[in-house]
Amino acid sequence: MDRILTTPISEQEARGLHVGDVIYVTGMMFTARDEAHLMMLERGAPFPVEGLILYHCGPVVKKEENGEWRVVSAGPTTSARMESIEDRFLERFPVRVIIGKGGMGEKTLAALQEVGSVYTHYTGGAGALAARAITDVTTVHWLSNLGMAEAVWVLSVQEFGPLTVSMDAHGKSLYNTLNATVRKNMQAIHEQIERSE
């Protein structure tokens, strides 16, 4: 089921999503990779984040002649980099949608259930396509401290997606399901090989 969610996204809206749902998001999104996560946990958020969208992304951004920033590419970062701190981040900053690639682990899955948020997958290698859905760079935080890729970019987006809900607030994880299927298939292959020897 394809849905468009607009920020601020409520806990109820996030809890209404399930693994396999396809969504698009409109409104305010911010980027944060591991260094930005740590900075926000240390110093606090420089803007209200509840109900916004967290994007695991290190964008390529260009400053135009008029002084405005333009996102050239905004592909997702591998989310496993944030697994060790994402649960603490969610408890302190209850974003409702996380966008990344590759999935996250059990600590994050538990935090999604507790807080009422979802993790969504965006296709890697589609950074230029992602940038087309970004309508404006609202502001940037800690650019001089962290550099372009690690800075926190606050972005306006219009129907950013498609995003596949791959971890939901009900304890379901597409990655866990796929891993179980792969293990089962590998076992069947090994048994078939042993029988044919």
Image (cartoon, rainbow, N blue to C red):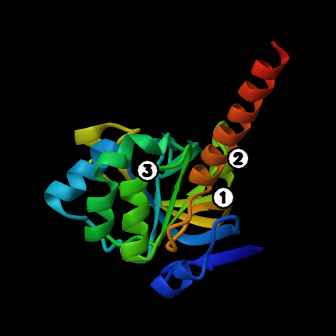
Q: Is residue 167 left or right of residue 51?
A: right
Q: Count residues near mark 3 (Cα–Cα under 10 Å), then give few for <14, some for 14-19, many for 20+.
A: some
Amino acid marked by disc 2: Leu
Find disc 2 in the rendering and name its residue.
129
* Secondary structure at numbered mark 3: loop
Find disc 3 in the rendering and name its residue.
105
Residue positioned most to the bottom? 12
Find disc 1 in the rendering and name its residue.
133
Residue positioned most to the top? 197
Q: Nearer the viewer, mark 1 or mark 3?
A: 3
Amino acid marked by disc 3: Gly
Tag 2–tag 1 contact (CB < 8 Å): yes
Tag 1–tag 3 contact (CB < 8 Å): no
Foreground residue, 108 or 149? 108
Residue positioned most to the left? 42
Q: Quadrant of residue 128?
A: top right
Residue beneath the point at 54% across and 68% down:
168
Residue 139 in view: no
Foreground residue, 52 or 156? 52
Foreground residue, 169 or 53? 169
Q: Is residue 68 above or below residue 64?
A: below
Q: Is residue 168 left or right of residue 4?
A: left
Residue beneath the point at 59% across and 82% down:
16
The quadrant in which the C terminus is found is top right
Residue 13 in view: yes
Q: Position of residue 46 (x, y in %)?
A: 25, 65
Q: Earlier in the sequence, mark 2 or mark 3?
A: 3
